[in-house]
Image: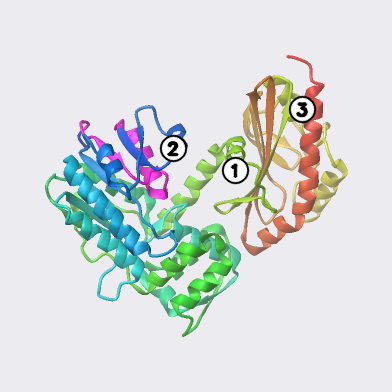
Amino acid sequence: MHKPEQRILLTGATGYVGGRLLAQLERSGQPVRCLARQPEFLRPRVASTTQVVRGDVTDRQSLLAAMQGVDTAYYLIHSMAANGDFEERDREAARNFGSAARAAGVRRIVYLGGLGSGSNLSPHLASRQEVGRILRESSVATIEFRASIVIGSGSLSFEMIRALVDRLPFMIIPKWVRVQAQPIAIEDVIAYLIAALDYPAGESRIFEIGGADVASYQDIMKEYARQRGLRRFFVPVPVLTPRLSSLWLGLVTPLYARVGRKLVDSLRNETVVRDQTASAVLGIAPRGLREAIERALTNEDKEFAATRWSDARSSQGKVKHWGGTRFGSRLVDTRTAYVERTPAQAFQPIRRIGGKTGWYYGNWMWRVRGWLDLLFGGAGMRRGRRDTETMRPGDTVDFWRVEAFEPDHFLRLSAEMKIPGRAWLQFEVDAADEGSTICQTAIFDPAGVLGLLYWYSLYPIHEILFAGMLRRIAREACNAREV
C-alpha cells in the first residue's frame, strides 16, 4: 500500500483517466487536491475529503498556490482537442507545471504519455513524449508512463472503434490499421498510476505499459464486433493514407473528428512495449484484449444503470437533439414533468403501468407492437402482470421485465420483445419545490446498423407515444390519493 501521509495534486480530474484515478484515490482514503479551471463544476462530483482549487496550467501563479504542501502531482492533461498549435500549448503548460512543482518543493510528478519509438513519430506522439522530457528537465523526479491504446468506455480510441464497428458492416482497411499495438485496459492504467505513489522518491523513470496481448486496430475491431454479436467484413486496400482516413473518420464519427484526425495520423507508429520492466517493478499483471473489452462493456452497463437521467437532462439545459442523445453506444430520449403532488402520489400511476392498466397513451399502438412481436417469435403483450398494484425485480410487465424497482421513486423495465438491440424504459420520481418531478427515459443500445435504422425510423412515433404517456401519467398523478 502507498503511504497514507502523501499529499496529492491531481490535474485532469474531469477527464477520462483523471476522473477514474480520482475515484480510486478517494476509495483508498487518500486526501486529494484537484486543480480545475472551473471548480464549481467539479466540487459536486468529489468526496468530502477532496479539495478543489481554481487553477490553470497556463497560469504559473495559480499552480504555485495549488502545489503548496504537495508530495506527488499527477499531470494528466494535453491540448490535442484545442484549435491551433497544440504542441506549443503543451510545451508551455509542461514548463509551467515543472517550474511550479520545483518551486513548491513537490517530490514527484506522475505523467501519462504515449507509447512509440523511432525518429518518425507522429506530431501527437512526439508532443506527448516531449512533455515528459520537459517535466523531467524541471529537476523534479518524474515517473512517465507511456501507454498504448487504452480500452475502456469513454476512451477516445475505444469510442472510435465502437463508432466504426457499430455503424459500418463493411470497412475499408488500409495498411496502417494493421500496425501492431499493445492495448491496455483502463483499470490497468489506473493501477500503474496508483503504484507510482510507492515508487522510491528522487528517481525519474520512463515505464512502457501495455496489455498482455499485441494486437492491431483491426484485431480490436474484430474482438469488439464478436462480443457485440455483430458480423463485420473488412476489405484491405493498398492506399488510403492516414490523412485521408482521418477525413473519412470525421464523416463517420463527427463527434471525435477534431482529435480523431490527430489520433489517426499517429497510427503509422507501432505502440508495442519494448521495455518490459514496468510490470515487474510495479507488480502489475495487465489483462489481455478479450478481458479488457469484456470489462469495458460490463462496466459501461453498471455505470449506465447508475446514471440519474433527471440530473443528466438538467445538466444539458434545454438543448434537445433529434433522435435523442448518445451516451457511449446507447441512444437516450429523456423528458420530465412537474406535478404538485408528493413523490408517493406521483409514483402511483407508474407502479400500475402495463397489464390491465395499459400504457396510458396509444394503447392500440402497443397492441400492434405486441402482435408484431408474436409474429417474429417474441412474447407479445399476453404475459400481462403478476399484480396490478405492486412490483418487484424479475416481474414481467407485458413484453418488459422489471429490472430495478424502488417504491415511490424508481422503476426500470428491460425490453424482452424482438428488437435489433437492447432497450429499457425508466422512470424516476423526486421531490421538487412544492411537488415532484417525473423523469421518463427511453434507452436503446442498437446492434449495428439495423439497430440504428430501427431507432431512427421509429423515433417520430416514439416522440408522440412517450410524450403522450408522460402527460397522461402526470394527469393521473394529480388525481392520485395520498397514501
Q: Earlier in the sequence, mark 1 or mark 3?
A: 1
Residue at left offset 29%, top offset 76%: 120
Cα separation between marks 1 and 2: 16 Å
* Residue 248: percent from left, percent from top: 54, 73
Q: Secondary structure at mark 2?
A: helix
* Residue 160: percent from left, percent from top: 49, 62
Residue at left offset 80%, top offset 44%: 465
Cα separation between marks 2 and 3: 36 Å
Task: Check the image and report above or below for 122 versus 213.
Answer: below
- Is residue 30 one of those drawn in magenta? yes
Please name the amino acid that badge 2 sits on.
Answer: Leu
Q: How did the renderer colour the structure?
A: rainbow
* Residue 170: percent from left, percent from top: 58, 73
Q: Nearer the viewer, residue 274 or 41?
A: 41
- Residue 42: give its label: 2
Task: Check the image and report above or below for 118 versus 426.
Answer: below
The residue carrying mark 1 is 316
- Is residue 165 one of those drawn in magenta? no
The residue carrying mark 3 is 349
Residue stretch in magenta = 4-31
Q: Nearer the viewer, residue 201 or 152?
A: 201
Q: Nearer the viewer, residue 102 or 450?
A: 102
Tell whether label 3 touches label 2 (CB within 8 Å). Answer: no
Using the rendered image of the protein, determine whether residue 214 is visible from the camera's viewpoint.
Answer: no
